[in-house]
Amino acid sequence: MKNVTQVNGKKLSKSEINLLAKLADKYGVTLGTSNEVRTNPFTGAAHSLPPLAVALFDFIIDNYRKGLVKGSTVASMSNPKAIPTAVWDKARYTFLAYWPKEFYDLID
């Protein structure tokens, strides 16, 4: 994740590069080696996503479902290991910036 500097030919901003480094270092997020399909369980919409999008998607969705995003559950408010909302939101905004259709189909 620390070596990613561009997505779809677009250069990542410094804050996006810092986010990816933080996700790798602090939260153990890693990149896969191939595209994977992710599905919205409510609508059935599915997309094949590149490795970075898969990593972001899994971080966003899995941590929210587990109640590990600060403020997503009452328990998360006192959990010292809860992910700050600002970090989680930055991951969502980064996904939205590079994969908008997939964001609206899978996450929003």
Image: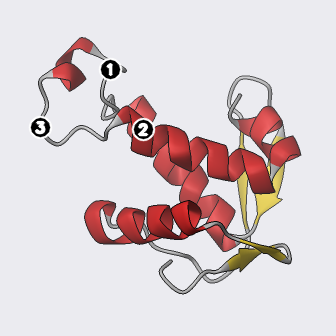
Is residue 61 visible in the rendered structure shown here?
no
The kind of residue tagged 1 is Gly
Image quadrant where one finds the C terminus = top right
Disc 1 crowd rating (10 Å Cα; few below 14, some 14-19, many 20+) is some
Q: Is residue 15 left or right of residue 98?
A: left
User: Of helix, strand and loop, which one carries label 2?
Assistant: helix
**Residue at 33% of width from left, 67% of height from top?**
28
Kindly report the distance in space between the C-alpha atoms of the residues bearing marks 2 and 3: 15 Å
Give whichever of discs 2 and 3 has the lower sequence position.
3
Residue that badge 3 annotates: 80
The kind of residue tagged 3 is Pro
Q: Quadrant of residue 53?
A: bottom right
The kind of residue tagged 2 is Ala
**Residue at 17% of width from left, 42% of height from top?**
81
Residue that badge 1 annotates: 71
User: Of helix, strand and loop, which one carries label 3?
Assistant: loop
Residue that badge 2 annotates: 86
Disc 3 crowd rating (10 Å Cα; few below 14, some 14-19, many 20+) is few
User: Of helix, strand and loop, which one carries label 1?
Assistant: loop
Kindly report the distance in space between the C-alpha atoms of the residues bearing marks 1 and 3: 12 Å
Disc 2 crowd rating (10 Å Cα; few below 14, some 14-19, many 20+) is few
